[in-house]
């Protein structure tokens, strides 16, 4: 009499355990998909671009979904803020160069990056900046030499704020809005 009841409890326990694991995995997948999508790689500006042009805009990517309001609010805010990286000091690209970040950007040595830094201390795909809700997030992509914000090595994602210095290889950027 006791064995069938215990067997029933074992089955019930296993069903509840698998249900719990399923719910956790679904929530993690949903959380990761909201705002954590990688910025799309875009084509580089042509070599025939006039040298006096000091501002480059990465090719727009699809706008990420923003929880509780769609993408229109975010696009309006980005339009008003005009987030950008300004080169403060670099041995490999022109000082004062401005990179607009409307839809985010990838930074690296690879020609497929939105911001190309031909520097031996920069990884092929070194870091990325991407919008999440009304903020921009900087993430190191596992680079060997690291990404630094205001002198501190970045670990994981970091919400970048206006005026902060971003150091990648031998290049120092300032984030502005």
Image: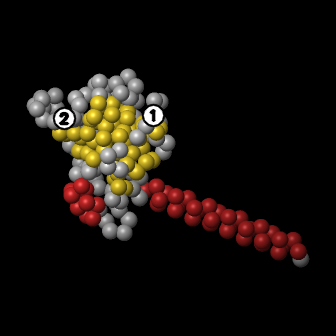
Residue 13: x %, y % from top left? 73, 68
Foreground mark, 1 or 2, reads: 1
Residue for badge 2: 45
Query: Could you tell me which residue is drawn at 32 percent across and 46 percent down?
Result: 163
Query: Could you tell me which residue is drawn at 29 percent across and 30 percent down?
Result: 89
- The numbered mark at residue 91 is none
Q: Are marks 1 and 2 in contact (CB under 8 Å)?
A: no
Please tell me how crowded label 2 is: few (under 14), some (14-19), or many (20+) other residues with Cα within 10 Å.
Answer: few
The answer to which image quadrant residue 123 occupies is top left
Instruction: Using the image, determine if residue 98 lies above or below residue 23.
Output: above
Q: Is residue 40 visible?
A: no
Instruction: Using the image, determine if residue 67 lies above or below residue 127.
Output: below
Q: Nearer the viewer, residue 109 or 157?
A: 157
**Which numbered disc, 1 or 2, marks the residue that appears first in the sequence?**
2
- The numbered mark at residue 146 is 1
Residue 85: x %, y % from top left? 28, 42
Query: Could you tell me which residue is drawn at 32 percent across and 49 percent down?
Result: 162
The answer to which image quadrant residue 168 occupies is top left
Residue 71: x %, y % from top left? 29, 62
Q: Nearer the viewer, residue 159 or 21?
A: 159
């Amino acid at each position: 009499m006791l064995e069938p009841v215990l067997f029933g409890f074992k089955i019930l326990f296993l069903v509840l355990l698998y249900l719990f694991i399923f719910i956790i995995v679904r929530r993690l997948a949903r959380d990761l998909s909201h705002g954590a999508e990688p910025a799309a790689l875009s084509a580089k500006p042509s070599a025939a671009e006039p040298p006096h042009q000091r501002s480059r805009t990465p090719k727009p990517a699809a706008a990420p979904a923003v929880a509780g309001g769609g993408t229109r609010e975010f696009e309006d805010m980005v339009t008003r803020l005009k987030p950008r990286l300004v080169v403060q000091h670099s041995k490999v690209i022109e000082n004062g160069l401005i990179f607009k970040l409307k839809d985010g950007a990838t930074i690296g040595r690879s020609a497929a990056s939105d911001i190309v830094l031909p520097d031996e201390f920069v990884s092929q795909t070194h870091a990325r900046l991407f919008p999440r809700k009304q903020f921009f997030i900087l993430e190191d992509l596992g680079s060997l030499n690291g990404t630094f914000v205001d002198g501190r090595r970045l670990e994981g994602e970091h919400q970048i704020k206006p005026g902060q210095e971003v150091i990648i290889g031998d290049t120092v950027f300032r984030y502005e809005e």
